[in-house]
Image: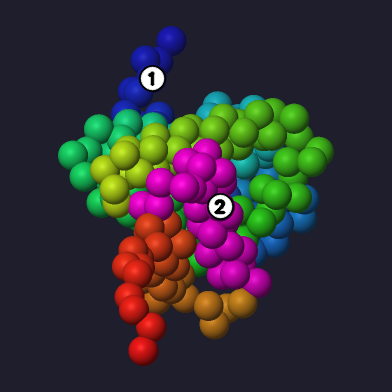
Amino acid sequence: MRKIDPAKHRARRRHIVHTAAQLFAAKGFERTTTAEICKAAGMSSGNLFHYFPNKRAIFHALFEDDAGDTGESKAERLARAQAGDDPWEALLEVVDLLTADAMDPAAPPLVMEAVVQVHRDPELDALLGRDNALEHTALTTLLTRAAAAGQIDPALDPHDAATWVQALIASLYSSAAADPAFKPAEQLPVLHLILQRFLQAPPHRENTPEA
């Protein structure tokens, strides 16, 4: 039996996933066929099934936490950010991490396609649920630390605020998917400013005598 090279196997899987992502983004999951994925990836269907059992498994792989070329998974990067010395800067780092994929034109429509598929795919629902919980925990931790450090409004509930931060991040993807003129890279500084205005403590108003 031929010995499988793990590095080549991973690289081949990533090639298939990247190729399929372009098709899923352009045509949607349902209208993309396995034959089209095989043709675009330059392999036979028999060869493809050495890497994925079916088309849905390829779609799931798009949303799995793969370390990729960086050698560091998203979970590891979130954990590192939570341990940062400055919670506000770490929070912005996490926001940048969670919006980074939106800079790829294929990512926003893929996210919207996942929203459609999740209602008919319990496995995808569980996968995205775990990912969402991981992100929410990281944001809540950093918001709690930032409030304790006096960097954000202590009256805000960190858990609820984290939910709204996630909603703003999601809107970056949905806006990019709905409007080709919407450029996530150009809007990221605006998102930072919105978060700062939303999260910062209200200015202290000293009592001043009336004129």
Q: Secondary structure at mark 2?
A: helix
Is 162 in the magenta?
Answer: yes
Question: Image height check: is 175 above or below 126?
Answer: below
Quadrant, the N terminus: top left
- Residue 15 in percent (x, y) is at 45, 45
How many discs mark residues in the rendered view? 2
Which residue is pictured at 35% across the width and 23% down the height? 6
Which residue is pictured at 46% across the width and 62% down the height? 198
- Residue 141 in percent (x, y) is at 39, 35
Q: Which kind of residue does numbered mark 2 sit on?
A: Trp
- Residue 173 in percent (x, y) is at 56, 62
**Main secondary structure of the magenta stretch:** helix
- Residue 172 in percent (x, y) is at 53, 64
The answer, for residue 176, to whether it is visible in the render is yes
Which residue is pictured at 31% across the width and 39% down the height? 148
Query: Mark 1 highlights which residue?
Result: 4
Quadrant, the C terminus: bottom left
Query: Mark 2 highlights which residue?
Result: 164
Q: Is residue 66 left or right of residue 182?
A: left
Quarter where residue 192 is shown: bottom left
Q: Secondary structure at mark 1?
A: loop
| Figure colour scheme | rainbow
Is 56 in the magenta?
Answer: no
Give the residues in magenta: 152-178
Callout 1: few (<14), some (14-19), or many (20+) C-alpha neighbours within 10 Å? few
State the separation of the CA atoms marked 1 and 2: 45 Å
Question: Image height check: is 9 above or below 210?
Answer: above
Callout 2: few (<14), some (14-19), or many (20+) C-alpha neighbours within 10 Å? some
